[in-house]
Amino acid sequence: MIPPGFEYYAPTSVNEATALLKQHGADAKILSGGMSLIPLMKLRLATPRYIIDINRIPDLDYIREANGFLKIGALTRESDLERSELVRSKYPILIDTSSTIADPLVRNMATVAGNLAHGDPANDHPATMLALEAQVVAVGPKGERRIPVSNFFTGILSTALSADELLTEILIPIPPAGSGGAYIKMERKVGDFATAAVAVQLTIGADGACERAGIGLTNAGPTPVRAKKAEDVLRGRKINDEVIRQAGQLASEESDPKSDLRGSAEYKRDLIRVLTARAIRRALERAGNGS
Ligand SMILES: Cc1cc2nc3c(=O)[nH]c(=O)nc-3n(C[C@H](O)[C@H](O)[C@H](O)COP(=O)(O)OP(=O)(O)OC[C@H]3O[C@@H](n4cnc5c(N)ncnc54)[C@H](O)[C@@H]3O)c2cc1C
């Protein structure tokens, strides 16, 4: 199907883009990689009257560490993450996540920021960013604000971004020594959205006890889910088989998946239990403390 007509803008600065957002409000949509927006427009499930294409704004395409954060600019593509030596060496959880998204053609276009801004609980980065306790930087006519990812997802396909705000940057706290993370996804076939997936990020102290635990779940409810009870059971303890079993069980209980073509709710809840345990083990290995 052909999308209905729209007016097209190609601003060359963040200020210009946010001024256009302010002018056109909810009738406008940002276009970054277009890998979610364009299919929705072709199905006429999204019918924006104004498209604001941010691809000509310079200096939004970067991956760098500064001031205690890994900073990912709004025009960083999935394929940029995969090619980044910094990400490959220090943030394998991001490679786990990115490499399971769609196919290389989609990943050459799709942005990490768009993956979050779309607000889809089936997208893969939200769970990982929850586990990493990331923040997003939103810029609007009133200035700039930081939003913790744990407060970002407000409903199905909706986020805490106002209609006049642009997501310009993702901030991931640089993990301290003894940290490791993993994202494990079950998909029906390569490139599919997750039946369910789990992200785990751990920090293990010198005494072998877990100092920090972040767990995020994909396709496990109307919004990406942070499995707080499962995190709590890990924190402060030496992680052994019994602790892992408890965390998997709690994550499963915290999930609220729906039955669909990918499986029944019961199957998905059990999958979350199993994937949580596997992701904890892989995160432990990467933290250098696992068996
Ligand atoms: C065949 C196919 C398979 C896919 N499989 C997967 C998968 O397995 N896992 C997965 O996670 N995703 C999957 N996707 C979705 C794809 O990864 C997402 O579309 C992409 O990450 C969204 O980023 P984008 O840059 O393409 O955003 P766009 O499509 O350009 O935008 C998506 C939404 O976010 C808004 N937006 C985008 N950028 C910003 C910004 N900087 N500030 C404010 N709002 C913004 C747009 O207005 C729009 O509402 C698939 C897509 C396709 C086409």
Image (cartoon, rainbow, N blue to C red):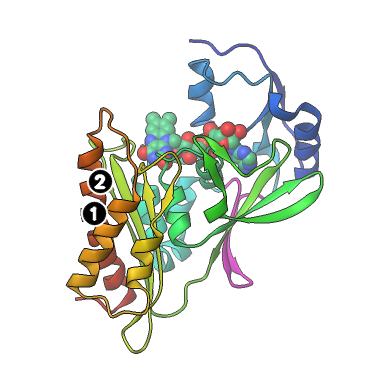
Which label sits on residue 273?
Answer: 1
Q: Residues within 10 Å of mark 2 (few under 14, many from 20)?
A: many
In the structure shown, which secondary structural element does the residue marked by tag 2 occupy? helix
Q: In this view, does 59 lie to the left or right of 191?
A: right
Q: Do we see residue 32 in this rendering?
A: no
Q: Is residue 182 left or right of residue 41?
A: left
| Magenta residue check for 38 | no
User: Residue, x 37% and y 46% (percent of image)?
Assistant: 218
Residue 49: give x, y in percent of width and height.
68, 19
Residue 12: give x, y in percent of width and height.
75, 39
Q: Name the residue under label 2.
A: 269
Q: Nearer the viewer, residue 235 or 199?
A: 235
User: Residue, x 24% and y 71% (percent of image)?
Assistant: 243
What span is colored magenta in the figure?
A: 60-75
User: Is disc 2 in contact with disc 1, using a CB cutoff of under 8 Å?
Assistant: yes
Where residue 208 sits, quadrant-wise, is bottom left
Q: In this view, does 60 lie to the left or right of 111?
A: right
